[in-house]
Image (tube, rainbow, N blue to C red):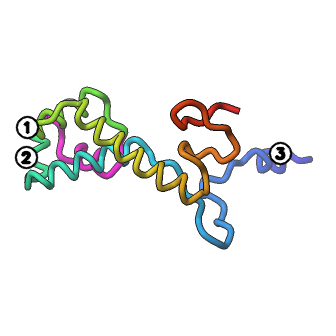
């Protein structure tokens, strides 16, 4: 085996392989997407601009935009500042994101045919919580 062939064998493709035909498998939502959606929804419900909230939170408008779109994983300090600028606490934003995660996870588990926790092969424990295998 040549050095070139050895190097080629170690290359990991950056692009995902083409998806097989049929319905796309659902994936777990990312926390940064959920938090970003909450921030954007709250900002829009208050009819406030990105610039206004970013200025009040003392973070850059571009960064807040990236956070809202789920492109950046914001620190707890940035999330707290954005939440406060919206008149919310950090716990409010996280609770709203958690509610969305539960809603999406419930829909996902139902579409996969799973039980309450979305794990079809595991027995349910107290209060319907699925137990580890």
User: 1 or 61: which is nearer to us?
Assistant: 61
Instruction: Return the residue nearer the eye: 86 or 92.
Output: 92
Tag 3, which secondary structure? helix
Q: For label 1, count other residues whose C-alpha is less than 10 Å away and answer few (under 14), some (14-19) or many (20+).
A: some
Residue 73 appears in which quarter of the rendering?
Answer: top left
Q: Helix, strand or loop at disc 2?
A: helix
Give the percent coordinates (x, y) of residue 14: 60, 53
Lateral position of residue 127 relative to residue 132, left or right: left
Contact? badges 2 and 3 (CB < 8 Å): no
Residue pushed farthest front?
A: 126
Q: Which residue is mark 2?
A: 52
Residue 106 shown left or right of residue 67 in the figure:
right
**Residue drawn at 31 percent across, 30 percent down:** 75
Residue behind mark 1: 56
The x, y position of residue 84, in whole percent, is 13, 33
Name the residue located 47 percent from the left edge and 55 percent from the top edge: 107
N-term mark: 1 or 3: 3
Q: Residue furthest top?
A: 77
Relative to 74, say whether 7 is above or below: below
Q: Is residue 21 above or below residue 10?
A: below
Q: Residue furthest bottom?
A: 21
Q: Quick check: marks 2 and 1 in contact, CB under 8 Å?
A: yes
Q: How far apart are the alpha carbons under marks 2 and 1? A: 6 Å
Residue that carries the numbered disc 3 in the rendered image: 6
Quadrant where the C terminus is found in the figure? top right
Q: Which residues are magenta?
A: 56-72
Kindly identify which numbered label has been placed on residue 116: none
């Amino acid at each position: 085996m040549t050095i070139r062939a050895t190097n080629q064998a170690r290359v990991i493709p950056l692009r995902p392989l083409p998806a097989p035909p049929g319905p796309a498998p659902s994936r777990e939502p990312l926390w940064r997407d959920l938090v970003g959606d909450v921030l954007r929804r709250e900002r829009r419900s208050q009819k406030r601009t990105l610039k206004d909230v970013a200025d009040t939170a003392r973070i850059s408008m571009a960064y807040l935009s990236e956070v809202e779109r789920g492109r950046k994983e914001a620190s707890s300090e940035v999330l707290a500042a954005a939440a406060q600028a919206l008149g919310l606490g950090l716990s409010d934003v996280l609770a709203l994101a958690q509610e969305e995660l539960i809603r999406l996870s419930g829909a996902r588990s139902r579409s996969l045919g799973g039980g309450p926790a979305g794990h079809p092969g595991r027995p349910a424990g107290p209060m319907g919580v699925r137990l580890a295998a």
